[in-house]
């Protein structure tokens, strides 16, 4: 009789211990699940990419960018290396893009609110300030990602988990005030690596993949990107561009 009671007590003790550890395991797993909003996902992404405060404290940024643009029939429209230089200070900001065509050396420059173009060191008035500003702003916006998404003009929406390049990803959808463009950015669920983005504009749809990234001074920056035109269902139709980024210098 005593031995039966002892066995029952032992069984109950084992079951109790097992139940306790099972509850602990389930509770721990639940606590590890991150429930994101658009802003909290972006906060984690920015921290993984190097940190917004650190990025905004830099004094200068310089890099080379290989640009290849292709027409729909596959013909090459542009194939060149560009030198991008940015200087930041309290009193002024300066941006410069320099490159060579087959015939000319071109420099686009911004200093504060002034935009100028130069061809073979001479002022080139064929490019308006608006055209120069658009080119510089487009380049700056992309190289500043993900930090350029953290602004009052951006409405951030986390839309859950999807697949991108055969990888499970978090989806961040961004709408900008005053713009009809809609950006959808994809981040690996396992480590928040930025895999690419899809953009719906008034004129077309574009899918960009980050084929390879690189680490510079603690920042995760692009190395190789490719851009495709797509249909409204995000099916790739033709390759529009290929980009390579090299020789980053950050102060």
Image (cartoon, helix red, strand yellow):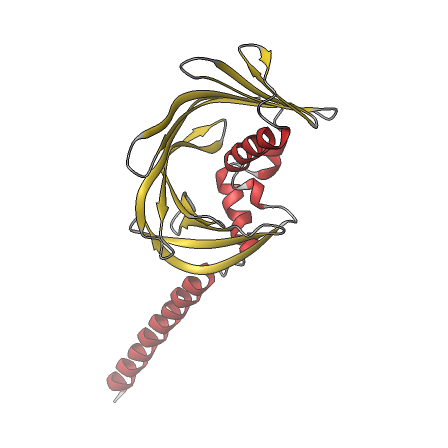
Please, which residue is most extreme toward the bottom here? Answer: 1
Left or right: residue 183 compared with residue 94: left
Residue 128: percent from left, percent from top = 61, 28
Above or below: residue 83 compared with residue 204: above
Residue 216: percent from left, percent from top = 47, 27
Q: Is residue 33 visible?
A: no
Residue at point 30% right, 77% down? 10
Left or right: residue 188 compared with residue 127: left
Q: Quadrant of the C terminus?
A: top right
Residue 138: percent from left, percent from top = 53, 36
Above or below: residue 118 compared with residue 239: above
- Image-quadrant location for residue 111: top right
Above or below: residue 4 compared with residue 140: below
Q: Count every numbered label the image shows and give the total.
A: 0
Above or below: residue 182 compared with residue 147: below
Residue at point 31% right, 73% down? 14
Residue at point 50% right, 45% down? 45
**Frontmost residue, 89 versus 244:** 244
């Amino acid at each position: 009789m005593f031995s039966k009671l002892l066995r029952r007590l032992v069984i109950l003790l084992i079951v109790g211990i097992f139940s306790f550890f099972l509850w602990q395991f389930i509770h721990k797993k639940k606590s590890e699940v991150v429930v994101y909003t658009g802003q909290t996902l972006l906060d984690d992404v920015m921290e993984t990419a190097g940190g917004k405060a650190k990025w905004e404290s830099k004094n200068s940024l310089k890099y080379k960018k290989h640009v290849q643009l292709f027409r729909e029939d596959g013909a090459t429209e542009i194939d060149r290396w560009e030198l991008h230089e940015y200087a930041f200070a309290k009193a002024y900001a300066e941006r410069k893009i320099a490159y060579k065509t087959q015939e000319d050396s071109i420099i686009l420059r911004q200093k504060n609110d002034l935009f100028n173009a130069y061809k073979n060191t001479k002022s080139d008035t064929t490019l308006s300030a608006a055209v120069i500003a658009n080119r510089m702003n487009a380049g700056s916006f992309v190289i500043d990602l993900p930090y350029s998404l953290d602004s009052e003009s951006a409405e951030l929406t986390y839309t859950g988990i999807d697949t991108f390049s055969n990888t499970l990803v978090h989806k961040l959808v961004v709408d900008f005030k005053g713009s009809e463009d809609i950006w959808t950015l994809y981040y690996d669920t396992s480590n928040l690596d930025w895999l690419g983005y899809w953009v719906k504009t008034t004129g077309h749809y574009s899918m960009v993949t980050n084929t390879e990234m690189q680490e510079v001074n603690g920042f995760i920056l692009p190395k190789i990107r490719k851009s495709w035109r797509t249909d409204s269902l995000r099916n790739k139709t033709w390759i529009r561009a290929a980009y390579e980024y090299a020789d980053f210098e950050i102060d």
